[in-house]
Image (spheres, rainbow, N blue to C red):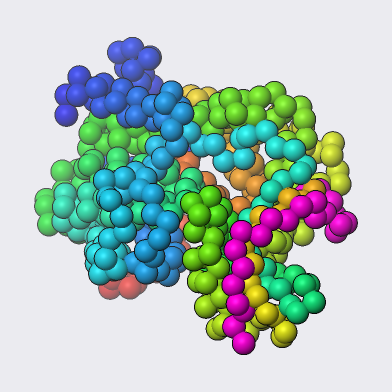
Amino acid sequence: MSRRARIVITAGVVSALVAPVLLDADGFPLSTYPMYSQARGDEVTLATARAVDGRGEHSTLSLGVIGDSDDPLIVAGELRTAISDGNAARRCEEIARRAARWSGLPAGSVSIEVVTERHDVVAQVEGRPSLLDRTVHASCEAPS
Amino acid sequence: MTDALPAPTRTRSLAIVEAVAPRERLAMLRILTGTFSVAYFLIRLPVFLQLGERRTGFDGVGLAAVLDGPVPSAVVDATVALTALAGLGFVLGWRYRIVGPLFALGMLALGSYRGSWGQLLHFENLMVLYLVILAFSPAADAWSIDARRRPSPGRVESTSYGWPIALCSLVLVVTYVIAGVAKLRYGGLDWVFGDTLRNHVAYSAARLDLLGSSQSPLAAWGVRNEWLWPIAAAGTIVVELSAPIALLGGRLRTAWVAATWVMHLGILAFMLIVFPFPLFLVAFAPLYRVERLWIDRPSWLSRAMSQRAA
């Protein structure tokens, strides 16, 4: 390959790498690498799904039940997208179906809820009460 | 090991395009990157296979942006199978001119498709970019099945082998610089001097907890020790923005590689987020004379290989 061709390709590769930054458009495999770059306070809203019993007590599900994946980034991201796209009810049904096959589902669970919860994450990590707010986006029947 | 980039020839600023290397160095980069990618792909195989069952929430990114919606599961299965086979050919250097691009394209397509459901995983980007560069380079001219079919030309050093390696090095450092710029761009100086990094660690731990997974045992300790985070944040920014020093070679390069590796180790320790490509050091391979890994192999390994051949 000629020297000129190598220069052109090298410039093209660098331009392609920098383009998402200039356009502020994240993608794959060319990215702005925005992960963990935004300013973040200690109060954060997180999407999750819960099992709820007859007394209204909430229990944690598992990554596999909530998102059919062992990757928390995928599970959290896709649940967030489902909520924002108005697909929380459909996602709730999917979670309920997976929960039916899950041995860890607490006895007495009557419903599954897809929620966003606002937490003081520092308090949460330190084991102190942290829940500030909860919004239920969808509720569906838990498997019996 | 010593520098991957040679002393500049004509002009210092064009050292990337003038880089010369032996074909074995490029071959070893193919073997390392290919082996890592195939192992990663096989470990994550259930995730890729499960993509075929998905029907809702599709928003195409990368190559998948050309799709109007999810593809049939048979297409996903076939792509996964073809990519796995091509990966094997990539590592072994078998019919590389066809198999190399096929594997890179497969990984690019599957990575794009996997990222099209609401969550991009940025730790695959660099690996795929290396694969694309290597796929279109003569990386199977040595230490490959293809090379065995041809008479050996002896020791050959050329820009044909050096430039793709230097291009991978350039991609590596630009990527880290972009990541550093993003933190200042989106987070501002508060990312360095405020509580942002501590809150990110707490957020990651809380997210894991709420999703029914386990948080890092170090997270609570780290969050309690607030003094740690401005130091870690400043260190992260310095490491990422100073990535170009790795191209200078020598101790500066190795110091940067060590600092970057420690940074990723810290991310793993406090946030349980794994960036496998740099953690397994494969991301840094273009910066070194990696062919020495085989040429300078321990004598016991040479003896064992000889006995096996006999």
x and y, in percent, of residue B251 in the image = 57, 30
Residue reaching furthest to the top:
B11
Q: Is residue B127 visible?
A: yes
Q: Is residue B35 visible?
A: no
Residue A117 versus residue A99 in the image, above or below: above
Question: Quadrant of the image for the C terminus of chain A?
Answer: bottom right
- A71 vs B226, left or right, is left
Q: Name the residue nearer the viewer: B290 or B68.
A: B68
Q: At x 31% / y 49%, what residue is drawn?
A: B64
x and y, in percent, of residue A79 in the image = 55, 58
- Quarter location, residue A136: bottom right
- A35 vs B132, left or right, is right
Residue B23 versus residue B7 in the image, above or below: below
Q: At x 30% / y 13%, what residue is drawn?
A: B10
Q: At x 69% / y 48%, what residue is drawn?
A: A45
Residue reaching furthest to the left:
B150
- B142 vs B195, left or right, is left
Residue segment shown in magenta: A121-144
x and y, in percent, of residue B206 in the image = 72, 55
Question: Quadrant of the image for the N terminus of chain A?
Answer: top left
Q: Name the residue nearer the viewer: A134 or B195.
A: A134
Question: How many marks overall?
Answer: 0
Q: Name the residue nearer the viewer: B40 or A75.
A: A75
Say whether residue A141 is magenta.
yes
